[in-house]
Image (cartoon, rainbow, N blue to C red):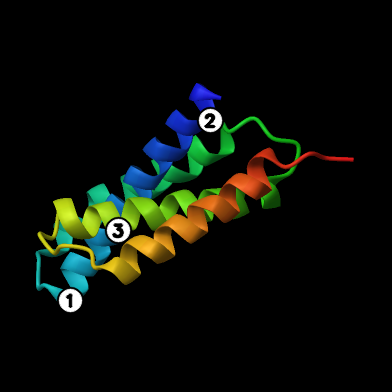
Amino acid sequence: MGMIYGLYALAALAEIAGCFAFWAWLRLAKPIWWLAPGLVALALFAWLLALVPSEAAGRTFAAYGGVYIVASILWLWLAEGRLPDRWDISGAAICLVGAGFILFGPRG
């Protein structure tokens, strides 16, 4: 279980960092060279997510969605300096519970 959590956490960090590099270039007028580490981060994200032990890619990606949402709210707070409000936190918690159902639900 710890390996799954670690892979999801690292994948989320890589995806958010990669997407933010593009956001910063396009929306914050950062230099174009910001795209290079962004592309590397997005490739790392895809590789890490592919390492998650699962019999189905779709289930892995769906469960990851909840982790990504929580990580994005943490990015909002820690990297962008914006305090999440109760709606951010409530929505992220609901998504994380849903991800848990997808990832750990009994399979028949």
- In the foreground, 91 or 6: 91
Q: Residue furthest right?
A: 108
**Which structural element holds mark 2?**
helix
Residue 62: where, in percent of width, then height?
A: 61, 54
- Crowd tier of the residue under label 1, counting other residues whose Cα lies within 10 Å: few below 14, some 14–19, many 20 or above: few
Q: Mark 3 belongs to which amino acid?
A: Ile
User: Which of the two discs, 2 and 3, sits closer to the camera?
Assistant: 3
Q: Mark 2 belongs to which amino acid?
A: Ile
Circle 1 residue: 27
Q: Is residue 78 left or right of residue 2?
A: left
- Residues at marks 1 and 2, CA–CA distance in whole angstroms: 33 Å
Residue 41: where, in percent of width, then height?
A: 33, 45
Above or below residue 101? Residue 85 is below
Q: Quadrant of residue 14?
A: top left
Circle 3 residue: 73
How many dots with numbers? Answer: 3
Tag 2–tag 3 contact (CB < 8 Å): no
Tag 3–tag 1 contact (CB < 8 Å): no
- Residues at marks 2 and 3, CA–CA distance in whole angstroms: 20 Å
Circle 2 residue: 4
Q: Quadrant of residue 26?
A: bottom left
Q: Mark 1 belongs to which amino acid?
A: Arg
Badge 1 or badge 2: first in the primary sequence? 2
